[in-house]
Image (tube, rainbow, N blue to C red):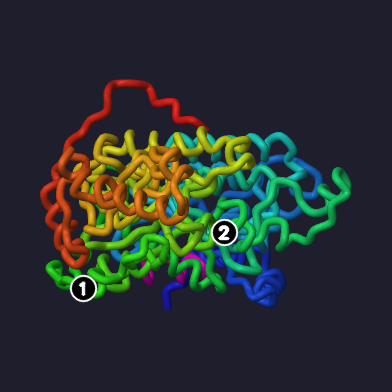
Amino acid sequence: MTQEDPRILELRTMREKARIGGGADRIAKQHAKGKLTARERLEQLLDHGTFNELEPFITHQGDEAGLAKEKYLGEGVITGYGQIEGRTVYVYAQDFTVYGGTLSEMQSHKICRVMDLAVRNGVPIVGLIDSGGARIQEGVKSLGGYAEIFRRNALYSGVIPQISVMLGPCAGGAAYSPALTDMIIMVEKHSYMFLTGPQVIKAVTGEVIDTESLGGADVHLSISGTAHLATKTEQEALEMCRRVLSYLPSNNVENPPFVTPDDHPLRMDEELNSIVPLDSSVAYSMHAVIEHIVDQGSFLEIQPTFAKNAIVGLARIGGHSVGIVAQEPMMMAGVIDIDASDKITRHVRACDCYNVPLITFVDSPGFLPGITQEHGGIIRHGAKVLYAYSEATVPKISIITRKAYGGAYVVMSSKYLGTDVNYAWPSAEIAVLGAEGAANILFKDQIESSDDPAATRTLLADEYRQKFNNPYHAASAGYVDDIIEPRETRAKIIASLAALRDKYAPAPPRKHGNIPV
């Protein structure tokens, strides 16, 4: 029998050491918390058997206290590439069993390496985050390592999709990296982000708060607006990452992937013809409108619990990826406020980065009035929406379902911001303001001098609505391209997308624009 080469045996031993990270005891502790290990996460994220690891034998370099005695292969992060639905992605997964996944100079080197490779090859980068932050023993080296990652997050923004899946802590300056990526997916009760933790806040301000209430998934999805999606388990988060990528191209010069639809492109849903109430003061569900129009089961809402008066998400229509933007009349009558402005702006720009056409459903009575909104900068935030739509060069289609008043009409993908096709439903009301408000201004003296001001106001408002607040008045002046039956919307959008597939609208030469922030 031929004796096995000892060098091969040594390689197998080294690979096994790299595979177990911080050791069996620490893996057991990770499992006891209900968390997967970094390698288990990669196995679930990627197509089976496609992962190829890079730089598994890297270790800490230097003589910092405590680190020279205990070195671990891989340095607390697993990096490499694999496939999701047959498409290549580069990945890194922080290993909490090695120094709590803290970032060191060499861990940064590994992460930056796969980020650079992802850009060179024009494929997405996915980060699985589970880290206690910068490795304190390394001091400025670890801070420099974070800066290298942040710089790449910024430089590669809009070039390749960057997805951050938060599977544990992400504290201090480390939180800036996911904040710079295209999508943040968090896990309820397991992941959290904050710049300063509960203890620091208590010492500085005297405020007392726990980790979950300070920076948990619910906080960032519903209050801060930092996160985009949240799931109950790690497995669901990893599956959600796969789903998000299915809507996006691999890079900014490709088109999104086409999925053969089960839904007929000419399907007409009769329910749409009666979904908008005759009384314009009665709310209806814009979510229901969207679900009736897009390919069945394809709508993925993003930030569903943040600024719920606005709806953004990804969907497919006729098998093609589209970005959805809308108001929700069921929430605050669909008015646009500061948070809704930021939510819409971010989504419009993200879709434009990755060649995802924009479909906008308009039903808004305007921007939210009030001292708090004005002092909070509603002008500046609203201008972001206007800027984003004006700048976007992807195919843009808008459908006015009901109210399109004043500034809300203008900023929400109106025709003269460069929108390619503008449709209106027969229920559309396009005007500077609502009929009641217009009557109060235009016929103030007549109303006040009448025997019954309330009845007079109602009569004059009805007359104004019939004459001016109807889609035919707007269509006569060219402000909409066509007035369609609601049930026709799906077929009309699919036909428009086909006509716009080769749209070419280069921006004027410039370094970059100066969006109000």
Q: Which residue: 37% across, 49% down?
A: 435
Is 203 above or below relative to 303?
above
* Residue 43 x/y as whole percent: 46, 69
Is 6 above or below relative to 510?
below
Membership of 470 in magenta stretch: no
Q: Which residue: 57% across, 49% down?
A: 58
Q: Is residue 114 left or right of residue 295?
A: right
Q: Which label is found at residue 221? A: 2
Q: Which label is found at residue 214? A: none
Nearer to me, 111 or 125:
125
Q: Is residue 503 left or right of residue 294?
A: left
* Residue 270 x/y as whole percent: 20, 74
Q: Are marks 2 and 1 in contact (CB under 8 Å)?
A: no
Kindly tell me whether residue 289 is visible in this rendering: yes
**Pointer 2 local density, CA inside 10 Å: few below 14, some 14–19, many at least 20:** many
Q: Which residue: 25% across, 69% down?
A: 272
**Callout 2 secondary element:** helix
Nearer to me, 263 or 478:
478
Q: Amino acid at mark 2?
A: Leu
Q: Write the start and end of the magenta stretch as one range.
A: 40-50
Mark 1, residue position: 269
* Residue 455 x/y as whole percent: 42, 56
**Pointer 1 local density, CA inside 10 Å: few below 14, some 14–19, many at least 20:** some
Kindly tell me whether residue 117 is visible in this rendering: no
Residue sticking out furthest to the top: 510
Nearer to me, 65 or 322:
322
Membership of 44 in magenta stretch: yes
Q: Quadrant of the N terminus?
A: bottom left
First of labels 2, 1 by sequence position: 2
Mark 2 to mark 1: distance in Å? 33 Å
Q: Is residue 361 left or right of residue 217?
A: left
